[in-house]
Amino acid sequence: MNIKKHIPNSITLLNLFCGCIALVFAFHRNFEMAFYFVCLGIFLDFFDGFFARLFKVSSPLGLQLDSLADMVTSGVVPGLVMYQMMVDNSTGSETYLQIFPYLGFLISLGSCYRLANFNIDTRQTDSFIGLPTPANALFILSLPLVLSYSDSLFVFEILTNPWVLLAITLVSAYILNAEIPLFSLKIKKFNFAANALQISFLMLSLLLLIFFQYLGIPLLIISYVLLSVVNNKWLKK
């Protein structure tokens, strides 16, 4: 029995398990624990592919399992978190305010479409087209934490405005599937020159997290998109 071929799929299932636990915490509005379990799931998601390549046991089953696990951890969870944020900040008797929270699940729909498209898009072997679902999930799940830990009145006004939350939802669903090439963070060769962009971004991410804590998370996701756009322009020259 080849145990090695089961290791990547087992890691993928652990990612799914983390997503299920994150859902429970999100239902109970414990956004911080939901965030940590999504982070753990994303960490595992990074390594299932790494071990599949290392052991040379990549398979169609593993590809499908990976997308199904990501749909929960990086698709359903952020949709639920946005739903909860909109419930908390869409109070009023107007009919549209009562409908608003359900629109948060547009994030889940956008994530589902992206994950399905990713499996059949041959252009996304070494990079991404559109924002990866894990990055989008981190962005969305960081918002209630930024709101909780920030003393800024401006941040409070922004993240408790239902129209702003709706705008974030729509942009999130769009950018997941936008035709924007984004560099991959997966390091396939242990060579600095080949991974200079990835390493530079990781260093920038570390600085943002150190100085801005939870606010650093949406900042680094925005930086990731902007760096990718600049890198694309540079490569075309």
Image: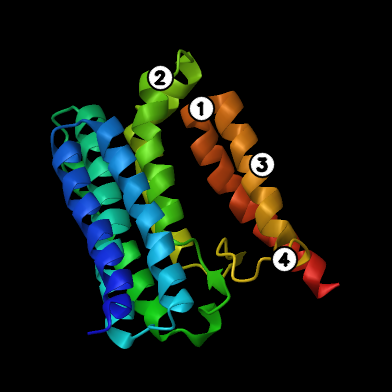
Q: Position of residue 209 (x, y in %)?
A: 55, 32
Query: Which is more N-terminal, label 2 or label 3?
Result: 2
Residue 171 appears in view? no
- Label 2 – label 1 distance at C-alpha: 9 Å
The residue that mark 3 highlights is: 204
Q: Nearer the viewer, mark 4 or mark 2?
A: 4
Q: Position of residue 134 (x, y in %)?
A: 41, 56
Q: Name the residue located 26 percent from the left edge and 28 percent from the top edge.
A: 89
The amino acid marked with disc number 2 is Tyr
Circles 3 and 1: CB distance less than 8 Å?
no
Residue 10 appears in view? yes
Q: Name the residue located 66 percent from the left edge and 43 percent from the top edge.
A: 203
Q: Report the disc number at residue 191.
A: 4
Q: Nearer the viewer, mark 3 or mark 2?
A: 3
The amino acid marked with disc number 3 is Leu
The residue that mark 2 highlights is: 149
The residue that mark 1 highlights is: 213
